[in-house]
Amino acid sequence: MKIKFLPFFLTIIFLTIFFVFYKSLQTSNIYTPKTNLEKNIPLFTADIFDSNKKISSEDIFKDNIYYLLNIWASWCAPCREEHIFLMDLSKSKKIEIIGLNYKDKIDNAKKFLNDFKSPYKIIISDLDGTLSIELGAYGVPESYLIYNKKILKKVVGPISTNSFSAINKLIK
Amino acid sequence: MKIINYLIIIFVFLSFNSLKAQDQNDKLNIEITKNLRCLICQGQSVYDSDTEFANSIKILVQNKIKDGKSEKEIYSYLKSRYGEWILYNPEFNKNTYLLWLLPILMFLIGGAIIFKLFIKKKN
Amino acid sequence: MASIVGSYSLIFGLSCSFLIIFFSIKNFKNTQVFDNRILSFTFLQFFLVVISFFSLILAFVYSDFSNETVFNHSHTTKPLFYKISGTWGNHEGSLLLWLLVLTLFISIFLLKSKKQKKQYRILTSLIQQIIIIGFFFFLIMTSNPFNYIFPIPKEGLGLNPILQDPALAIHPPMLYLGYVGSSIIFSSSLAAMTLNDISRDWAKHIKQWVLVSWFFLTLGILLGSIWAYYELGWGGFWFWDPVENVSLMPWLALTTLLHCILVLEKKLFLTSWVVILSIATFTLSMSGTFLVRSGILNSVHTFANDPERGLFILIFLFCLIFLSLFIFFFFFKTDKNNNSLFWLSKETAILVNNWFMVYFLVVVLVGTIYPIFLEVFSSEKISIGPPFYNKLIIPFLIPFLLAMTIGPKLKWIKSDLRNKGYLILFFIISLLLSIMIIKNLSINFLVNTVLVTSAFYLFFITSRDFFVKGFNKLSQNIAHFGFSLLILSILFNNIFSTEIISNLKIGETFEGKNFKIKFEKIKQKEEYNYKSIKGKFKIENLDGSIEVLYPELRIYNQPNIVTSEADIKTNFLTDKFMTMNYVQNQDYFNVRYQVKPFMIWIWLSVILISLGGFVSFFKRYEN
């Protein structure tokens, strides 16, 4: 009895291992964490870009207005790609675009804004990148659609045609 | 015996006196960042990586230590933002009971098998 | 041209397999004499794979971009050495290397096993041919190194610069010699099991193969580790990275096998255990290939992944596993003879060794594949890193080291502890020495003292044996001594390492407690296939000694990647390790300076360990 049990048991174990490996082959191993969509955005105070003033998150994000928080830098090439979408959104009355200038030199950032026009209503700056970590960001560019202090949508990487229309749908 | 003792003392003084412990905060920072995964890299820790993301995390950890946050608080802060994936040191919870206990269980089973070998041979 | 030759010789090589199988089956029952056609065709097959391999090398050397593999992994501006090593630095080429070693080893096996029984030789060759056919199909169907592209590109895509390194050029061949050596152990144990022929003679005969694969695997892992130390630029040498673990697992299984085969050599005991380990070793090597090649692990070393390839290896791997299970349960008869086991004997010591080794193996195995399982069952993703392994391995290392010290002192069958007073004396010395070293440091006293004590203990006892025993049991002594040295070096390296990380502009000076670092200047230079930025750093130590280090940044042109080359000053006691890194949009560099004691001893001790295997191999060979 004992002798018959062991082969059976081992076969089951190895079949399970096979199944697990097979399953994980099918799924991609690129990890995109669940965004904490339900949670409120963290409270923070940040420096206003190109000034000595500070602003708190409560003063930036008011209720009943859509905000797009966009993390950008003058040295980031994909930020130029998404610029056209940001300009388009900035014309809309339903949404305000908040810029978060990431690890940038102020002169370069100013030049960037001069060259390309600024889509931003307010720009806050994040010199050492810690504010972005506070928001749970990975790098530049990254955008958060915020309504009533909650994150509705998170775009990692440049805004594309797809994510642009998704944002438009959400703010309708 | 005396000679051996002298030799030991000389040996110890020669090799290790110049090396001293580092600043406690720096040490803690290194320890914490070694236990964090750099999320935009392929299998590197934050400590080992020089990407913008990793550098920001390093600064953040440094600030948190300065604010007097404990190691645990820093981990849970980062976990709330990036999920358990960022922690190299898996917590002991329902997801990881098996992870921590399986090796120990196998060790005990191994011990039992060896023990049985002795018992069987006696009979 | 070379590609055509290579690709045809692969197909002919595959057909050799079928001829060999045909002759083997015919020859298996008929006569008493071994059919030499099997041997001839095995050689022919090996020869054909060699041709195929060389034609791939030629394609790389002449940058023949009509070959897809060459196009994807080479570039005309690459130095010749890396053009050649680039042959096996990619998926297709490395599989061809696997095949080359597989056919080489079965040829050697057939040559060297003339004294063995005919049926055993044929059966081993048959099982080996099954593996070889599997790899032929894998190579030809999913990853043919000789795919043709048209129109012929003018330039290749280049080899990842961090792979352009001498240690990494010879690392894969070494590792594969180890992995593939275990395939012979696998085939041979299955053959011996089928014929119910697991005997002391078999143990003696297969032990040579165990030693060979163990030796190469040890060196292979060492080279990988050295590469990680100076190339990845983190100053670490082992990261518990999944791909590293995957090479460590077969090594642990092989080491266990190496020890327990000693018992089988003396008496018919633990036969089923030896067989299980033989199967496990090769299975683990194959799983390693699967895990690395399929890309389901998240690692620094992951190669490009392709689910189709992963699926092929997976199915093939499990066919082999179920074949072994089948043979194990239907053919294998456990030994019924009653060998008595006394608690204080060498057998017990080896059992204890096996017990711990298997535990370490389970820790590494579980740690490596647990995240995969968790993700499939609960879609949660977790990371398992160094803290997990440290917590589960270090406490068990202490009894392991103690058993390793006392074990070799015991005799076979029955032993006692008379005339072993020196064991206690040395223990006390080790303990005192460790307390003195640890007590002034701000680290966990108890754990570190006990660890260092047990490592010193093994160190002293094995050192003593060199004088007392001389050439008797030399191989074992060298290996165990090497291991104690390894543990000691790693411990002291961990305890006494210091490091600083700082942002420095040119001309700035960092003031540390024990040293000052001055960033003097940078020098830019155009090299053959990269642009080099070299920093010059002057380090003034507290004792007045001055050191100059030149860490480097390399901006490679094909593909466009920036790598950071550490500058390491190695001497007998410490390594001074410095890297610098470019920081986005800033005029300073991120500089990392580490003082790492006993680094070189880590490498030397691993070389000593493998030397133990080497000596043992030739000692046996002479007998």
Image: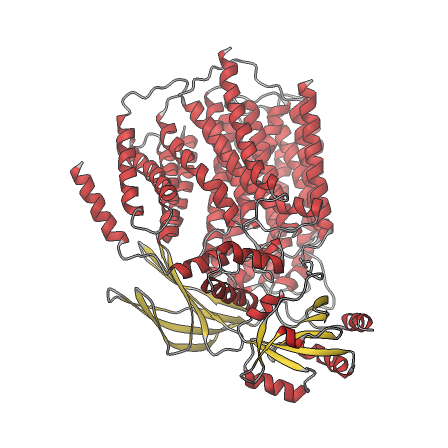
Asked where in the image residue C29 lies, by quadrant, the reply is: top right
Q: Nearer the viewer, residue C155 or C3?
A: C155
Query: In the image, is residue C354 above or below residue B122?
Result: below
Residue visible at 57% across and 14% down? C336
Q: Nearer the viewer, residue C179 or B78?
A: B78
Q: Position of residue C121 (x, y in %)?
A: 60, 28
Query: In the image, is residue B36 above or below residue C425?
Result: below
- Point out the residue furthest to the top here: B123
Answer left or right for C164 relative to C327: left
Answer left or right for C166 relative to C133: left
Q: Position of residue C182 (x, y in %)?
A: 56, 37
Query: In the image, is residue B93 above or below residue C553?
Result: above
Residue visible at 37% across and 53% down? C599
Quadrant that contains the C terminus of chain C: top left
- Point out the residue furthest to the bottom here: A114
Residue visible at 46% across and 46% down? C219
Q: Nearer the viewer, residue C532 or B89?
A: B89
Q: Position of residue A81 (x, y in %)?
A: 70, 78
Quadrant that contains the N terminus of chain C: bottom right
Q: Nearer the viewer, residue C369 or A170?
A: A170
Asked where in the image residue C619 lies, by quadrant, the reply is: top left
Answer left or right for C124 relative to A91: left
Asked where in the image residue C285 lies, by quadrant, the reply is: top right
Q: Position of residue C613 (x, y in %)?
A: 43, 37
Can residue C429 be seen by looking at this rendering? yes
- Point out the residue furthest to the left here: B2
Query: In the image, is residue C410 above or below residue B70?
Result: above
The colour scheme used here is: secondary structure
Can residue C30 be seen by looking at this rendering? no
